[in-house]
Amino acid sequence: MERGRLDRRIGAYTAAASAALAFGATQAEAAVVYTDIADVTLNHGDTFSIDFDGDTVNDITISGGSTYFNQISTGSVLGTSSINDNALALPAGFVVGPAPTTGSFGPGYDLWQKSDYGYYGNWINVSNRYLGVRFTIGGATHYGWVRMSTVNTDTVTIHDFAYESLADTPIVTGITAVPEPGTLALFASGAAGLIALRRRRRKAAPIA
Ligand SMILES: [Ca+2]
Ligand SMILES: [Ca+2]
């Protein structure tokens, strides 16, 4: 009897925590929206589009390119135009936002290109680097990243990606979640309630 009642009360707390999660998700707080995919490898001529927010508008398209270049054909990415237009291959922990410490956002950047002197670019034979992305949702500016690896200038493998759901807010490459303060506070009060409940239960239990 007593155990059954306790289980029902724990069930109620779990339901409250779930409701808090759903509620928290609708708040205008910074939140990283992370998506892992089965890794996709692009060969020459392949293209892959990412719709970060699921609004059916593709936010970035990465092309396997030709033997001469590999191009970002839709969307703005962080790059540098010091040597033509090359996308940066960012390390983990880089802040992608309105004021990047290096590079600038632009369309039409390449992962690599070929000249008379050979291949150049930042995305030749790199492992687990990040493409910094800027795109719009309903006119508002959002930032994101795409983790990729390349083998020479032959293939591009796309591992996973994330974007910041709050407009004009930076995102850090490699970070896949930001705790939501409101949700955490609700969870904390729920946990405190459970502890109080357990204490009462223990007190009420007869000494064996
Ligand atoms: Ca979109
Ligand atoms: Ca993956």
Image (cartoon, grey):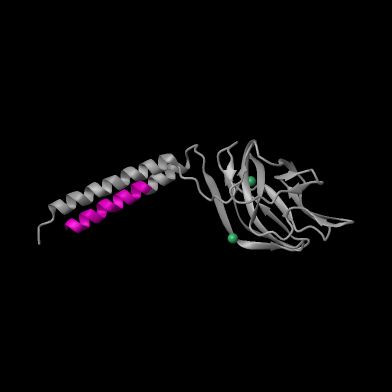
The residue range painted magenta reads 1-17
In the visual, does 48 lie left or right of 164? Answer: right
Residue at 27% x, 49% y is 194
Q: Do we see residue 170 in this rendering?
A: yes
In the visual, does 6 lie left or right of 148? Answer: left
Q: Depth check: 126 or 108 in front? A: 126
**Does 52 appear in magenta?**
no
Magenta: main secondary structure: helix
Q: Depth check: 87 or 198 in front? A: 87
Vertical side of 159 occupied by 132: above or below:
above
Residue at 42% x, 46% y is 21
Q: Do we see residue 138 in this rendering?
A: no
Q: Quadrant of the N terminus?
A: bottom left
Position of residue 124 measured from the top left corner of the image (x, y, whole percent): 74, 58
Q: Quadrant of residue 141?
A: top right
Q: Quadrant of residue 48?
A: bottom right
In the visual, does 73 lie left or right of 134? Answer: right
Q: How many marks overall? A: 0
In the visual, does 50 lie left or right of 204? Answer: right
Position of residue 178 measured from the top left corner of the image (x, y, whole percent): 49, 45
Q: Depth check: 38 or 179 in front? A: 179
